Image (cartoon, rainbow, N blue to C red):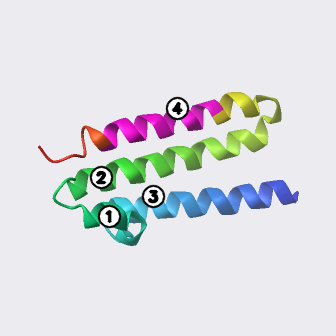
């Protein structure tokens, strides 16, 4: 096996497992800054947004290794996902 593929598999699995753990509330330490501001954020919604972003990024990483010629495009997709995460965090996950 190629070293790139092994690293990709490990990173993908770690991100996916962390995303699922955050969604189910088992990894709140990963969003502790937001827990301190719990009066500002709905933690259930924040868990869903954060976990979904990590899972989406975990699904994009294998394509970066498989399609080596599309690194710029896929990096742009990751940046777009991060921007959408920021927007959802400040709108949907915020307490009203």
Q: CA distance from mark 4 to mark 2?
A: 18 Å
Where 49 falls versus 25 (above or below)? above
Q: Which residues are magenta?
A: 76-89
- The residue sitting at 58% across, 32% down in the picture is 77
At mark 1, the secondary structure is loop
Name the one closer to the observer, 25 or 88.
88
Quadrant in the picture for the N terminus: bottom right
**Which dot marks residue 19?**
3
- The residue sitting at 15% across, 48% down in the picture is 95
Q: Is residue 31 left or right of residue 1?
A: left
Name the one closer to the observer, 26 or 40.
40
Q: CA distance from mark 1 to mark 2?
A: 11 Å
Residue that label 2 marks: 46
At mark 4, the secondary structure is helix
Image coords of residue 37 (percent x, y): 24, 61
Q: CA distance from mark 3 to mark 4?
A: 18 Å
**Which dot marks residue 80?**
4
Crowding at label 4, few (<14), some or many (≥20) Cα neighbours within 10 Å?
Answer: few
Which of the two discs, 2 and 3, sits closer to the camera?
2
Disc 1 and disc 3 in contact, CB within 8 angstroms: no
Q: CA distance from mark 2 to mark 3?
A: 12 Å
Disc 1 and disc 4 in contact, CB within 8 angstroms: no
Q: Mark 1 vs mark 2: which is more N-terminal?
A: 1
Image coords of residue 78 (percent x, y): 58, 38
At mark 2, the secondary structure is helix
Which of the two discs, 1 and 2, sits closer to the camera?
2
**Which dot marks residue 24?**
1
Name the one closer to the observer, 15 or 41.
41
Q: Mark 1 vs mark 4: which is more N-terminal?
A: 1
Q: Is residue 16 left or right of residue 45?
A: right
């Amino acid at each position: 096996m190629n070293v790139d593929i092994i690293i990709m598999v490990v990173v993908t699995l770690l991100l996916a497992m962390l995303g699922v753990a955050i969604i189910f509330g088992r990894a709140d330490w990963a969003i502790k800054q937001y827990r301190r501001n719990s009066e500002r954020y709905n933690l259930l919604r924040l868990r869903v947004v954060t976990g979904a972003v990590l899972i989406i990024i975990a699904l994009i990483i294998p394509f970066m290794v498989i399609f080596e010629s599309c690194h710029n495009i896929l990096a742009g997709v990751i940046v777009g996902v991060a921007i959408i995460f920021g927007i959802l965090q400040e709108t949907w996950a915020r307490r009203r």
